[in-house]
Amino acid sequence: MSYTVPYLISFLIGYFLISLTFSLTHGNQRSRTLPNSPPLYLHFFLAAGLGLSMSANIVFYILVFVDRINKNFSIQFNLLLLFLLVLAQFYFCRKNKNPFWKLAGWDLQKSAAIFLIVLLLIPLWKYAQLFQPFGGWDAWQVWNFKAKFLTLGEDHWKNMFSPLLWRSSPHYPLLLPLINVWAWLFLDQPLDIVPLITASLFTFLTGGLLFSSLSSLTKNYHAIFATLLIFTLPFWALLATSQYSDIVLAYYLLASMICWLEGSRQNSPAYLFLSGLFLGSLSFTKSEGTIAVTVIFLLAIFYTFFNKAKTYDHKLKLFFSFLVGSAINGLPTLLFEWLYAPMNQTFINGLISTSHPASLERFKVIMVFFLVEIINKKWNGLWILLMAGIFLSKGKGFNKTLIIFPLFLGTYLMIVLVYYFLNTYFEIFWWLQNTLARILFGILPVVIFWVFVSLEWEDKKSRSNEGE
Amino acid sequence: MASTSPKHSTFFISFLNFNFKYCYVLAVSIVILINSIQLTQEIIKLNQVRKYHSYSYPGHQFLGISSFLENSQYIGYYTDKNLSDNLSARQFAQAQYILAPIILDLNYIHHRYILLDCTTEQKAWAKIKELNLIPYKISKSGIILAKNPNQ
């Protein structure tokens, strides 16, 4: 029972925060052209992740103010936030005559598909229990280590930024450790099962989010194939249950992109605000998340202000919603970087270093390794299949609405590859072998979403042509 | 040669689309099937292995040590193992995790407590003698916690 309470509180926080966002921005419109909430299943899968990031943020703020993890304050402030959200939602529901707890949109087929996703979690859980019950290497060296340090470190928790712990990457952001700390607050001791529950939950949420967003966007049950593609892949199972931050990054990146797409498609400030919130959380997952946030943020500016279809005031309103969301959930990252984060000790600028220069040979190795990784048998031809999907979509994946996906993916991968080239601290073969697959793992749900949406986009167009 | 009428060409394109879409769904289904078989095989294989070899977590050798460390925030860690080697690095990382929030310092000499994790117990004892340390606790696996009287 104690295991589920923190996750349940977070889910409710996320649920009511999303409801309130829609009530505030779309609820009072007369024409009702915008929805008063996201589709039911999408709402659930967004709520769980958003709520966990909000709870982790509260734990972090209390850590900043009290200078140690405080169980009572953390729980009380989470409950207070939940109470305030429920109260506000109740008020706006009465004012706008909307239902308080929405169950419209319940669908037997979608529920069955989600039940299938839950069933698929059983082999993944079994796999994790058998293969790595305590997670992979970075789980005990980085993520769970930080969570344990925060929980037991009392007033000397800042020792975790000691240069002696360079192997634990002290400069990495703290979202995943704080989520585990939040769950541990309800237990007597930091049990090892909690990080495994968190990893499994994020795996489920990523699969569920992929299905619910695709099915609501394309109105096609092929969406379940997208989730099955990743849930059955042994390499995905391995990384998703490794208790690394990569699955957390994958979830927040996907959530942010989905909300961005819905926001820009429907000109919805609520979705763009949510996209900003998820983007803020993404920046707190790990360094790659911060890179992704920078890329998406710059693309969002260009996309919003170069879209000719809207008025300038409307553009500003949409962008402002996105900006406020990003600022709210990006604040913990800024505080962390400003107050605590030490310098990255595992960085040597290869362009100016004479002892570790970035050579042309290194560049060639990176490019070849990247291409070899794409066709590596551990992916079972998934990347080739996805590339074929984009080819078959006949350019629809590059249309005005979806262009942000290839632009983001291309720019993000380019920056990552440049970073591999530039930072010559690590021996390049070892580094690529240990991390490149995780970079691809992080973007995989977004790529699958993009490919499936592109394919279905074509179908809709074809159907309308046939109608003509 | 007579040109195809627009109606016919639309039909032809939609026919191709139809085939492509279902071919793609078929390809995706095949990949899912292959994935599922591989995952099932891996789980069955692991299940069989675990019947004879339970999961080992070398860090568990360090369980309980923290209760003897009197609120120390840092302790020394001496090892004659090569930490570039995967197995030794793994054991060190897991020891650090199990003992957190106590930090293991490889520059061991300046600390009151020193943890000696050597390839053989004899080597650990030799080091204790060399540094005039006082042995404090010994684990079943031969890891020795010693006090440094000079600190």
Image: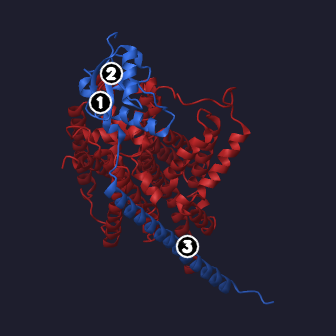
Chain colours: A red, B blue
Residue placed most toward the observer, A252 or A79:
A252
Residue A160 is drawn in which quadrant?
A: top left
Q: Chain of mark 3?
A: B
Image position of A465 with respect to A193: above or below: below
Residue corresponding to mark 1? A62
Crowdedness near tag 1: few (<14), some (14–19) or many (≥20) residues, C-alpha within 10 Å:
some
Residue, x 63% and y 45% (percent of image)?
A414
User: A98 left or right of B44?
Assistant: left
Residue A468 visible in the shown view: no
Q: Are marks 3 and 2 on the same chain?
A: yes
Q: Chain of mark 1?
A: A
Residue corresponding to mark 3? B24
If the image is split into quadrants, where does the C terminus of chain A sit?
bottom right
How far apart marks 1 and 2 lie (CA) works out to 23 Å
Residue placed most toward the observer, A417 or A8:
A417
Image position of A65 with respect to B130: above or below: below
Residue placed most toward the observer, A341 or B130:
B130
Q: Are marks 3 and 1 on the same chain?
A: no
Three-letter amino acid code of the residue under disc 3:
Tyr
Image position of A184 with respect to A262: above or below: above
Element under label 1?
Answer: helix
| x and y, in percent, of residue A418 in the image | 64, 40
For residue B73, which numbered disc appears in the image? 2
Residue placed farthest to the bottom in the image?
B2
Sequence order check, earlier mark of 3 and 2? 3
How far apart marks 3 and 1 lie (CA) works out to 51 Å
Element under label 3?
Answer: helix
Q: Nearer the viewer, mark 1 or mark 2?
A: 2
| x and y, in percent, of residue B88 in the image | 45, 36
Residue, x 67% and y 48% (percent of image)?
A367
Residue placed most toward the observer, B47 or A151:
B47
Residue placed farthest to the top in the image?
B150
